[in-house]
């Protein structure tokens, strides 16, 4: 531990010495430029930037119209091919999932049939609940049998 204490005191001594030298020589104390000088420097930097920018624009080799049309055609063809591939993949997966669902329904129905219950010929609008095919129609409002009564103003 004694070695660490010596190193710490040396670092503090070195830092103090550096501060004293900077204070004596005036290093680290930059004169703050006036507003006019700052504006001149900023304006000069802007002019230099604009000049460099225009020079870089002149170096660009722009493609001719034929090349642009060719590259546009390539991009459109690529987009079309990728779009068709995505559509085919989506169509296949959708129908595959529907097929698996239909197969599961048929398997469930055949298991029910093997248990001795009869399957309805038309299963549309029916749902298999606890081994029985039950219609899934929405509840219709019950018809009213009583005739509406009317009152006259004379009563």
Image (cartoon, rainbow, N blue to C red):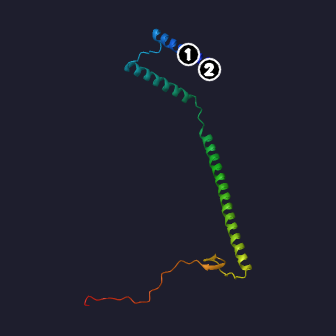
Disc 1, SS:
helix
Q: Nearer the viewer, mark 2 or mark 1?
A: 2
132 on left or right of 24: right
Location of the C terminus by quadrant is: bottom left
Marks 2/1: CA–CA distance: 13 Å
In depth, the one of 36 and 135 nearer the eye is: 135
From the top left corner, tell me how far across and down residue 35 is, in percent: 37, 21
Sooner in the amino-acid sequence: mark 2 or mark 1: 2
| Image coords of residue 23 (percent x, y) | 46, 11
Residue at x-position 49% and y-position 13%:
19
Comparing 38 with 29, the one in front is 29
Mark drawn on residue 1 = 2
- Within 10 Å of disc 1 (Cα), the crowding (few <14, some 14-19, many 20+) is few
Question: What residue is shown at x 61% (from left), y 79% (from top)?
Answer: 134
Farthest front residue in view: 2
Q: Which label is found at residue 137?
A: none
Q: To which residue does mark 1 refer?
A: 9
**Crowdedness near tag 2: few (<14), some (14–19) or many (≥20) residues, C-alpha within 10 Å:** few
Q: Quadrant of the N terminus?
A: top right
x then y, percent, for residue 81: 66, 52
Q: Extreme top residue here?
A: 24
Q: Is residue 33 above or below residue 87?
A: above
Could you tell me which residue is drawn at 35 percent across and 89 percent down? 149
Residue 105 image position (x, y, % from top left): 68, 72
Up-down: is 103 above or below 45? below
Is 122 or 44 nearer to us in this picture? 122
């Amino acid at each position: 531990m004694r070695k660490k204490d010596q190193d710490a005191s040396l670092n503090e001594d070195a830092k103090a010495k550096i501060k004293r030298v900077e204070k004596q020589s005036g290093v680290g104390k930059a004169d703050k430029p006036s507003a006019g000088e700052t504006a001149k420097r900023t304006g000069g930097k802007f002019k230099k930037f604009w000049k460099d920018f225009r020079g870089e624009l002149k170096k660009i080799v722009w493609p001719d119209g034929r090349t642009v049309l060719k590259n546009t055609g390539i991009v459109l063809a690529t987009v079309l091919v990728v779009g068709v591939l995505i559509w085919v993949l989506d169509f296949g997966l959708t129908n595959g999932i529907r097929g698996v669902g239909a197969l599961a329904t048929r398997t469930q129905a055949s298991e029910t049939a093997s248990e001795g219950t009869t399957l309805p010929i038309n299963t549309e609008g029916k749902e298999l609940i606890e081994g029985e095919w039950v219609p899934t129609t929405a509840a219709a409002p019950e018809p009213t049998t009583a005739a509406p009564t009317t009152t006259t103003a004379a009563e």
